[in-house]
Image: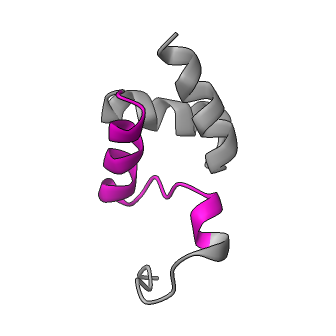
Amino acid sequence: MADDKSKIGGQDRIRVASSQVYEVRDFADKFDISPAQAKDLIERFGNVRETLEREARKLNI
């Protein structure tokens, strides 16, 4: 099923959609990591944004 881009915010923002290239790229850019590192984080910790942000910050310490 295609991502409905007219429905934004709320539940959609608590997760990072690993199947959406632009979401992985934007997440990686935000934390100055590579898209490959971002995908690795998603695979290891799931797609909950709060958890991913915490783990991404650890990469830049």
Q: How is the image coloured?
A: one colour
Q: Left or right: where does residue 17 sit relative to residue 44?
A: left
Residue 15 position in % (x across, y down): 60, 57
* Count of marks placed on residues: 0
Q: Is residue 24 above or below residue 15?
A: above
Residue 22 position in % (x across, y down): 30, 57
Q: Is residue 55 above or below residue 6?
A: above
The answer to if 48 sits in the magenta stretch is no
Q: Residue at x 40, y 83 (%)?
A: 5
Q: Residue at x 46, y 52 (%)?
A: 18
Q: Residue at x 55, y 24 (%)?
A: 57
Q: Residue furthest top?
A: 61
Q: Is residue 25 above or below residue 55?
A: below
The answer to if 16 sits in the magenta stretch is yes
Locate residue 42: give its quadrant: top right
Secondary structure of the magenta portion, mostly?
Answer: helix
Locate residue 2: give its quadrant: bottom left
Residue 4 position in % (x across, y down): 44, 86
Q: Left or right: where does residue 22 sit relative to residue 17?
A: left
Residue 12 position in % (x across, y down): 59, 71
Q: Left or right: where does residue 61 sit relative to residue 5?
A: right
Q: Residue furthest bottom?
A: 6
Point out the stretch of residues depicted in magenta. Answer: 12-32
Q: Residue at x 41, y 27 (%)?
A: 37
